[in-house]
Image: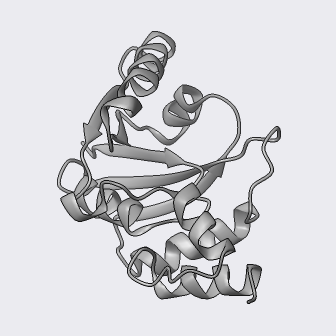
Amino acid sequence: MTRIAIYPGSFDPPTKGHEDLIRRSLALADRVVVAVAVNPSKQPLFPVAERLAMLRATVGDEPRVSFEAFEGLLAEFAESVGASMVVRGLRAVSDFEYEFQMALMNRRLHPALETVFLVPALDLTYLSSSLVREVARFGGDVNGLVHPAVADALSARYPQ
C-alpha cells in the first residue's frame, strides 16, 4: 500500500524551508503531494500557476513528489488523492496553536487523516514566505533563502 502525504500551503513564494520539509517528508511517505491552497479571499503575490512552476523548479525531477492546486477543505482534498497524512512545519511555538486546531479539525472531517509536524532545519527556522517577500520588496538579497528560480521571479516582480 502506498503511503501518500500532503504538504499543503500557500507557497507564496516557496522558500528553502519549504524545500527542506518536502524532501524530509519523503522519509515518511512513498509519495508527497505538494498542495497549493487557493484562497479567493487573499491577494497572493504570485498566481497559482507560477507558484506551482516555482515549486517544480525548486524540487526538480523527484518522481515521488507531485504538485497540485486545491480549493476548499484540505480533508476533502486529502481524501480525493488518497492521502493518509498531512505534513506541516512548525517554526516556533507560536505556530503550534493554529496548527493544532487545524489538525484536530482535519481529523474530525477525515478520521483516517493524521497530521505530522516537522521542525525545519535549524538554519531555516526563522524563514517564512512573508519575510522573503518583504526582503525582496525592499531590494534585499534573497539568494540562499529561496531557489534561484524563485529569486528570479521575485526580482522580476520587484525590479530595483
How many numbered dots are placed on residues in this image? 0
Q: Is residue 70 left or right of residue 141?
A: right
Residue that appears at 35% across and 75% down: 62
Q: Is residue 50 positioned above or below 87 on the image?
A: below
Residue that appears at 41% across and 16% down: 107
Residue 93: % across, % down? 31, 31
- Furthest toward the top, the residue is 108
Q: Is residue 33 left or right of residue 64?
A: right
Q: Is residue 115 positioned above or below 14 on the image?
A: above
Instruction: Classify residue 3 by image quadrant.
Output: top left
Q: Is residue 140 left or right of residue 63?
A: right
Q: Which one is in front, 120 or 159?
A: 159
Q: Is residue 41 left or right of residue 99?
A: right
Quarter of the figure that contains the N terminus: top left
Residue 105: % across, % down? 49, 14
Quarter of the figure that contains the C terminus: bottom right
Residue that appears at 46% across and 66% down: 15
Q: Which one is in front, 127 or 119?
A: 127
Q: Which one is in front, 20 or 109?
A: 20
Residue 4: % across, % down? 34, 45
Q: Is residue 38 positioned above or below 41 on the image?
A: below
Q: Which one is in front, 26 or 46?
A: 46
Instruction: Classify residue 127 by image quadrant.
Output: bottom left
Residue 48: % across, % down? 71, 61
